[in-house]
Image: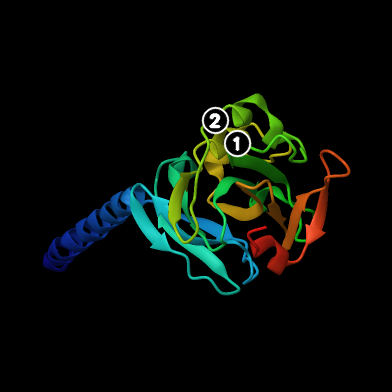
């Protein structure tokens, strides 16, 4: 009888401690915000711009550059991506007036071989002669304020307008609020003199064919003529 009583007195605090520890762990787990990931597509070293940092709720996270450019954030807000901005450095000799950015959600692809499900966002006003490919030509993009990134300077561009585009993306397989990783790529850059950079190529308007562009060398692009 004494043995049972002693055993009960010994086990009761142990059991209570285990239950308390389990409850505490659960509370801590509930209070830990999930990690979010921004994957930045690496740019060619001759690209006119560089993504210098990702800015989230006013905190700047330097881009590691190199072949694997991924920045990890901690945020429990389901609309976390609406609070992300990119710090863009102009490495060219010309003012930048617009930047087109592509977004992809890897989790929305059913396999690694499936093509990226891309959504486009233009920050700044596209030139009248710029080729249109779809979403970047929508009225809200046309009417937004112009940007002006002078040579050698950096400007922080908010990506808030990308969130509703991804939220309404017709090929999504989950709600955007359930996504914790988004791929970002600088696709096209437009300059004050109407020249353009796209996928490692420099182009200028074709004077013989309105609305068309012709490829030029980097040297010709950088020239003041």
Return the residue at label 1: 125
Q: Element under label 1?
A: loop
Q: How far from the left and from the top, in percent, is residue 109?
A: 72, 51
| Placement of 79 over or under 15, stated as above or below | above
Q: Which residue is found at the position 53% from the left and 70% from the top?
A: 65
Dot label at residue 106: none
Q: Quadrant of the N terminus?
A: bottom left
Point out the tag, 2 or 1, that comes first from the N-terminus: 1
Q: Which residue is found at the position 62% from the left and 40% from the top?
A: 121
Q: Element under label 2?
A: loop
Q: Which residue sits furthest right?
A: 208
Q: Quadrant of residue 61?
A: bottom left
Q: How far from the left and from the top, in percent, is residue 139?
A: 65, 25
- The scheme the figure's colours follow is rainbow
Q: How far from the left and from the top, in percent, is residue 9?
A: 13, 62
Return the residue at label 2: 144
Report the Cα–Cα distance between label 2 and label 1. 7 Å
Number of numbered callouts drawn: 2
Using the rendered image of the protein, determine whether residue 51 is visible from the camera's viewpoint. yes
10 Å crowding of disc 2: few (<14), some (14-19), many (20+): few
- Marks 2,1: beta carbons within 8 A: yes
Q: Quadrant of the C terminus?
A: bottom right
Q: Quadrant of residue 173?
A: top right
Q: Nearer the viewer, residue 107 or 7?
A: 107
Residue 164 lies left or right of residue 73; in this view the side is right
Q: Which residue sits furthest front?
A: 225
Q: Nearer the viewer, residue 161 or 170?
A: 161
10 Å crowding of disc 1: few (<14), some (14-19), many (20+): many
Residue 219 lies left or right of residue 73; in this view the side is right
Q: Nearer the viewer, residue 183 or 15?
A: 183
Using the rendered image of the protein, determine whether residue 34 is visible from the camera's viewpoint. no
């Amino acid at each position: 009888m004494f043995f049972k009583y002693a055993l009960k007195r010994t086990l009761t605090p142990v059991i209570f401690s285990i239950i308390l520890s389990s409850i505490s762990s659960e509370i801590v787990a509930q209070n830990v915000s999930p990690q979010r990931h921004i994957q930045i597509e690496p740019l060619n070293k001759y690209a006119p711009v560089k993504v210098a940092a990702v800015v989230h709720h006013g905190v700047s996270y330097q881009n590691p550059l190199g072949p694997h450019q991924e920045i990890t954030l901690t945020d429990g807000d389901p609309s976390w991506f609406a609070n992300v901005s990119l710090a863009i450095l102009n490495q060219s000799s010309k003012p930048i007036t617009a930047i087109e950015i592509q977004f992809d959600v890897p989790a929305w692809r059913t396999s690694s071989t499936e093509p990226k499900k891309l959504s486009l966002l233009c920050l700044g006003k596209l030139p009248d002669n710029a080729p249109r490919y779809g979403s970047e030509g929508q009225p809200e993009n046309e009417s937004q304020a112009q940007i002006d990134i002078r040579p050698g300077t950096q400007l922080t561009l908010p990506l808030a307008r990308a969130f509703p585009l991804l939220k309404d993306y017709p090929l999504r397989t989950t709600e955007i609020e359930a996504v914790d990783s988004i791929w970002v790529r600088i696709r096209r850059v437009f300059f004050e003199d109407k020249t353009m950079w796209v996928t490692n190529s420099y182009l200028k308007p074709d004077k013989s064919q309105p609305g068309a562009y012709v490829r030029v060398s980097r040297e010709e692009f950088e020239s003041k003529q």
